[in-house]
Image (spheres, rainbow, N blue to C red):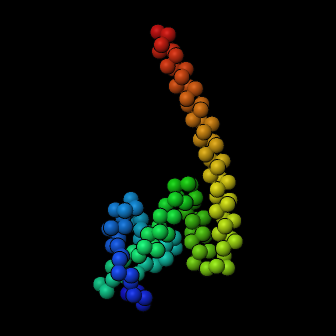
């Protein structure tokens, strides 16, 4: 199955994308099958070829993943994105909600980090006293 749209001159193979993103080729195929990535262009031999726009989207998905967004929410966001400008307000709302969850998570990690620092200080003092 080849793309009906001509591919941009600069495209990357799945192996090159895997090397740049740290995702395995299997994960990239899964992302496409799960609807996180729209079907990418294909070479005349049927091999996936990722364009700059695909890479930008994958980079954003990785940021969402790194900030703790669930696959289900990433799928919902990707679907809204595919549905175009009419979904801009919904996408904005999703990102704002995710940002609130992220800030809560960061705060919780900071509190835990301070508790860890206190415990390290405690054990360092115990060792100094011996």
Percent position (x, y) of residue 16? 33, 67
**Quadrant of the snapshot with the N terminus:** bottom left
Residue furthest out toward the bottom: 4
Question: Residue 34: in sight, yes or no?
Answer: no
Q: Count numbered badges in the picture.
A: 0
Residue furthest out toward the front: 9
Question: Which of 16/73 is in front?
Answer: 16
Question: Residue 86: in sight, yes or no?
Answer: yes
What residue is shown at x 64% (from left), y 58% (from top)? 98
Percent position (x, y) of residue 89? 70, 71
The vertical placement of 116 against 124, above or below, is below
What residue is shown at x 39% (from left), y 75% (from top)? 50
Residue furthest out toward the top: 130
Location of residue 116 (image quadrant): top right
The vertical placement of 4 against 58, above or below, is below
**Is 40 on the left-hand or right-hand side of 113?**
left
**Is 27 on the left-hand or right-hand side of 106?**
left
Percent position (x, y) of residue 103? 64, 49
Question: Which of 32/84 is in front?
Answer: 84
What residue is shown at x 39% (from left), y 81% (from top)? 8
Percent position (x, y) of residue 65? 52, 58
Location of residue 54 (image quadrant): bottom left
Location of residue 108 (image quadrant): top right
The vertical placement of 115 against 94, above or below, is above
What residue is shown at x 57% (from left), y 69% (from top)? 75
Residue furthest out toward the left: 45
């Amino acid at each position: 199955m080849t793309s009906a749209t001509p591919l941009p001159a600069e495209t990357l193979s799945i192996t090159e994308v895997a090397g740049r993103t740290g995702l395995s080729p299997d994960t990239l195929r899964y992302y496409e099958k799960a609807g996180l990535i729209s079907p990418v262009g294909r070479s005349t031999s049927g091999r996936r070829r990722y364009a700059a726009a695909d890479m930008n989207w994958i980079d954003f998905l990785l940021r969402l993943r790194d900030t703790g967004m669930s696959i289900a929410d990433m799928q919902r966001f990707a679907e809204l994105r595919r549905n175009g400008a009419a979904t801009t307000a919904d996408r904005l709302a999703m990102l704002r909600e995710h940002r609130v969850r992220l800030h809560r998570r960061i705060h919780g990690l900071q509190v835990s980090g301070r508790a860890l620092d206190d415990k390290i200080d405690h054990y360092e003092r115990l060792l100094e006293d011996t």
